[in-house]
């Protein structure tokens, strides 16, 4: 049974015209002649099968994070189909110059049948070992051995679905070509059939599938945003947005905004940690429903800051949230514990969709919101006498780092724009991060670059921030070496990344290598479970943020022992 790939649609053999005046072969004849099996039941091509088997085996090589069996099966099926498509296209191109005889083809099949089953078994065995080692490295429980069988089953199902879709498309192309062949020459009929099927397929994918998925995700996210998390109640304190005295309505905050303002540690908890009297923290937030535009929401937050006396605190911190409006409570609480509540933390929602959807659909929302809030707060802060200003800190995580960078535009402006800036898990699209890593000092790695001339530091492990010497950085990037959000890039399809050349990051196994197309799909799948990794791995930073704040803006008398004590508290 020959498996069909997308490349088969391009390489449809056109019947030849007779230059001797013989009647032209019709499309129907070219399809139904006895020497050619029906389109839906043709067998594999030698080159397609060989490359599919190679891609299938390589898909089991390790990547940044362990993969559950069903995602490994999907990756294996997709990469095998990609290999078959490439092999079929290469075979069709080669046959225009040289067509092997039946004996040669028969020998090639025998060689493949002798080698491929053993090769697949070897890679399945290696995959079990690689996944076990990767899980141990990251502190994750090892997978069960029987998952391997389910992985193979999912991969065959994925491959079969892609085969079915491709064969339906090719059959549709031939059907249209047969219809067009009554009025136009054969070659033109095939071209017209291919173009029509391609346009209809694109329309169905874009308008039906993508639009439907986006609409469904939007409605689901809107419902989630209207809810309230378990244990979250409206604060009575006037120092919180959404309280009875607040300018911002409780219902307008959205789910993540309500979580933000209602989850601060109590004065009793802060005092128990610090051993000295504490203040009640200020937390202010504006949701999508709090005002009509980003600028109006930013102005509302500043009015809330004036109302609560936020600029009289020791620290004012601006948080650019993720796509849903979420801010990690470990990040906010760590700053409040460090300063015994003498803080004012502000944030603003720009979407209720997950970051990856916001990133793909409309990045302008995060840039507009970040620019509006940071500019509004900074302008009010800069108007104060220098000696009376609180420390101004800025935080961004994931898509929030992108919005923060776009607000300032350059590393120099980021350094000069605040007393400290902490960015966790920057994306591949971050312009300043790209510029800094590209211009890193010779010999320094892309996962832990050294950028001379500016007080900018990078850390792939939190402990690296505990010994930075006398010079204190103004901007810190925390980027776990196994974080796919940091290292995913479309160029993985065709280009070997710097982080897979030479020395690897602390979390990256030396068994991971770059393969065209394959590494792209592996890293793409890693994104799905990036937030499920243990702290300090993947896209999970949580209590590790304490090291970032301690290196960036520690309160007087803060020690490494305090950092470890606070991390232990947050982890509990």
Image (tube, rainbow, N blue to C red):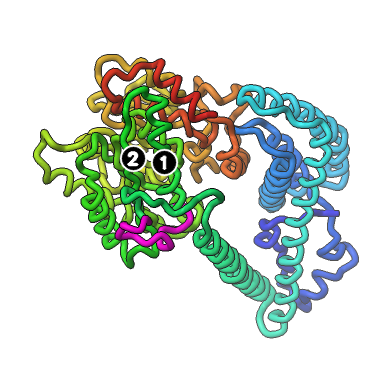
| Residue plotted at (31% across, 65% down) | 293
Reply above or below: 555 against 99: above
Quadrant of residue 445 within the rendered picture: top left
Mark 2 and mark 1 residues within 8 Å of each other at the beta carbon: yes
| Mark-to-mark CA distance, 2 and 1 | 7 Å
Residue 395 placement (x, y as % from top left): 35, 39
Residue at disc 2, secondary structure: loop
Quadrant of residue 138 within the rendered picture: top right
Residue 251 placement (x, y as % from top left): 43, 62
Which residue lies under the disc numbered 1? 264
State which region is magenta.
242-256
Which residue lies under the disc numbered 2? 281
Residue 487 placement (x, y as % from top left): 49, 37
Q: Nearer the viewer, residue 353 or 61?
A: 353
Residue furthest out toward the bottom: 183
Report whether 240 appears left or right of 529: left
Q: Which mark is residue 280?
A: none
How packed is label 2: few (under 14 Cα within 10 Å), some, or many (20 or more)?
many
| Residue plotted at (38% across, 28% down) | 271
Quick check: can you spot residue 250? Answer: yes
Residue 489 part of the magenta-drawn span: no
Q: Earlier in the sequence, mark 2 or mark 1?
A: 1
Reply above or below: 342 against 398: above
Q: How many marks?
A: 2
Residue 252 part of the magenta-drawn span: yes
Quick check: can you spot residue 97? Answer: no
Magenta region, main secondary structure: loop
Report whether 338 appears left or right of 47: left
| Residue plotted at (77% across, 76% down) | 26
Report whether 515 appears left or right of 498: right
């Amino acid at each position: 049974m020959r498996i069909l790939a997308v490349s088969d649609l391009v390489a449809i053999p056109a019947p030849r015209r007779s230059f001797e005046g013989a009647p032209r072969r019709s499309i129907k004849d070219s399809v139904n002649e006895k020497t050619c099996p029906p389109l839906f039941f043709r067998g594999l091509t030698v080159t397609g099968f060989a490359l599919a088997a190679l891609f299938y085996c390589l898909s089991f090589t390790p990547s940044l994070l362990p993969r559950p069996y069903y995602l490994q099966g999907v990756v294996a099926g997709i990469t095998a189909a990609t290999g078959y498509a490439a092999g079929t296209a290469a075979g069709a191109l080669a046959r225009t110059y040289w067509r092997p005889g039946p004996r040669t083809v028969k020998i090639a099949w025998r060689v493949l049948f002798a080698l491929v089953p053993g090769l697949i078994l070897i890679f399945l065995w290696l995959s079990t070992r690689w996944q076990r080692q990767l899980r141990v490295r990251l502190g994750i429980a090892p997978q069960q051995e029987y998952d391997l069988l389910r992985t193979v089953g999912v991969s065959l199902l994925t491959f079969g679905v892609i085969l079915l879709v491709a064969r339906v498309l090719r059959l549709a192309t031939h059907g249209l070509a047969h219809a067009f062949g009554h009025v136009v020459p054969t070659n033109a009929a095939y071209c017209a059939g291919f173009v029509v099927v391609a346009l209809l397929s694109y329309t169905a994918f874009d308008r039906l599938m993508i639009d439907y998925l986006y609409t469904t995700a939007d409605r689901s996210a809107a419902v989630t945003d209207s809810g309230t998390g378990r244990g979250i109640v409206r604060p009575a304190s006037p120092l919180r947005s959404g309280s009875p005295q607040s300018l911002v309505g409780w219902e307008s905050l959205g789910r993540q905004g309500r979580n933000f303002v209602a989850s601060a540690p109590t004065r009793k908890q802060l005092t128990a940690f610090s051993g000295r009297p504490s203040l009640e923290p200020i937390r202010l937030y504006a949701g999508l429903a709090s005002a009509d535009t980003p600028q109006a929401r930013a102005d509302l937050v500043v009015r809330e800051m004036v109302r609560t006396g936020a600029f009289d605190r020791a620290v004012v911190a601006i948080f650019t949230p993720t796509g849903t409006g979420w801010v990690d409570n470990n990040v906010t609480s760590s700053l409040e514990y460090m300063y015994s509540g003498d803080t004012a933390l502000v944030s603003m929602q720009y979407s209720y969709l997950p970051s990856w959807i916001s990133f793909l659909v409309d990045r302008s929302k995060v840039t507009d919101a970040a620019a509006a809030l940071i500019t509004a707060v900074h302008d009010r802060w800069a108007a104060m006498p220098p000696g009376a200003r609180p420390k101004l800190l800025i935080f961004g995580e994931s898509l929030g780092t992108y919005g923060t960078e776009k607000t300032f535009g350059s590393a120099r402006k980021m350094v000069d724009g605040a007393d400290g800036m902490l960015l966790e898990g920057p994306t591949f699209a971050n312009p300043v991060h790209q510029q800094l890593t590209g211009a890193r000092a010779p010999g320094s790695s892309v996962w832990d670059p050294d950028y001379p001339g500016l007080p900018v530091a990078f850390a792939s492990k939190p402990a690296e921030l505990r010994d930075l010497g006398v010079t204190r950085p103004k901007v810190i990037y925390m980027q776990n070496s196994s974080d796919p959000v940091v290292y995913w890039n479309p160029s993985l399809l065709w280009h070997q990344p710097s982080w897979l050349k030479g020395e690897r990051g602390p979390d990256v196994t030396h068994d991971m290598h770059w393969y065209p197309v394959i590494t792209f799909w592996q890293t793409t799948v890693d994104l799905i479970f990036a937030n499920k990794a243990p702290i300090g791995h993947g896209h999970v930073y949580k209590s590790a943020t304490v090291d970032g704040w301690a290196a960036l803006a520690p309160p007087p008398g803060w020690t490494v022992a305090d950092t470890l004590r606070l991390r232990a508290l947050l982890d509990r």
